[in-house]
Amino acid sequence: MKSDRRKSLQNIARHDHDPLKGFGWEVIVSRRGLYHREYFSDSHHGGKAGALAAAQLYRDELLAWLPRRLPVKTRNTRNTSGAVGVCVAAKPRKGWTATYVVAHWPGEGTASFSADKLGFKEAWRRAIAARKKALAALGVTKLPAFPPKRQTRRKSA
């Protein structure tokens, strides 16, 4: 039962701590670097329940209109290679260590390329190409650029 309540309030926050600004519900949805926000005041919607109903309706319409969320990790601050989802791995063998370049993507997908056989640059190039091909098969055709986040606001009618 708690999960139903949590789902019904997804992307919705209650504001009732500042009587000067008023009380109400705020819908906040982020997609691909843009924030979509709207505030629903209790006084304009006939009380707390009316404002919540209006916020839920707006949220449902907004989520139906916006593109779905990308399940792909596109940037990580700990990444030092410059290619998200591509890393170097070493496996000890009898008397030597094998070096691989490994590409990862959602859905437990991986591909590894031997740096010992192909050379590091070629293994790296193939790993990046394999990740791009796998992401395209998942429907992610363009990874977003990362400008500073902007805010957009939909005006109330």
Image (cartoon, rainbow, N blue to C red):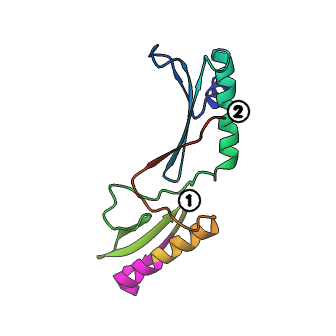
Q: Residue at x 68, y 27 (%)?
A: 54
The amino acid sitting under disc 1 is: Glu
Residue in the foreground of this view, choosing between 152 and 149: 152
Q: Is residue 11 magenta?
A: no
Kindly identify the amino acid type of the residue bearing the numbered disc 2: Leu
User: Of 107 and 3, which appears nearest the observer?
Assistant: 3
**What is the magenta range?**
111-126
Residue labelled with disc 1: 108
Q: Was residue 113 drawn as part of the magenta stretch in this picture?
A: yes
For the residue labelled by badge 1, is the local secondary structure a helix, a strand or a loop?
loop
Q: Is residue 89 above or below residue 26?
A: below
Residue 81: image x %, image y %?
A: 33, 67
Give the crowd class for mark 2: few <14, some 14-19, many >=20 residues within 10 Å.
Answer: few
Q: Is residue 151 left or right of residue 93?
A: right
Q: Secondary structure at mark 2?
A: helix
Crowd class of label 1 (few under 14; some 14 to 19; many from 20; radius 10 Å) = few
Q: Nearer the viewer, mark 2 or mark 1?
A: 2
The residue that disc 2 covers is 57
What is the C-alpha distance between the residues marked 2 and 1?
A: 36 Å
Looking at this view, is 99 or 73 the one in front? 73
If you read the primary sequence from the N terminus, does the residue marked by circle 2 or circle 1 appear first?
2
Residue drawn at 52 percent across, 53 percent down: 32
Residue drawn at (66%, 44%) of the image: 63
Whole-percent x and y of residue 67? 64, 53
| Predominant SS along the magenta part | helix
Q: Quadrant of the C terminus?
A: top right
> In the picture, which quadrant includes the N terminus?
top right
* Residue 58, horizontal then vertical, whole percent: 67, 35
Pointer 2 with pointer 1, Cβ within 8 A: no
Residue found farthest to the front: 157
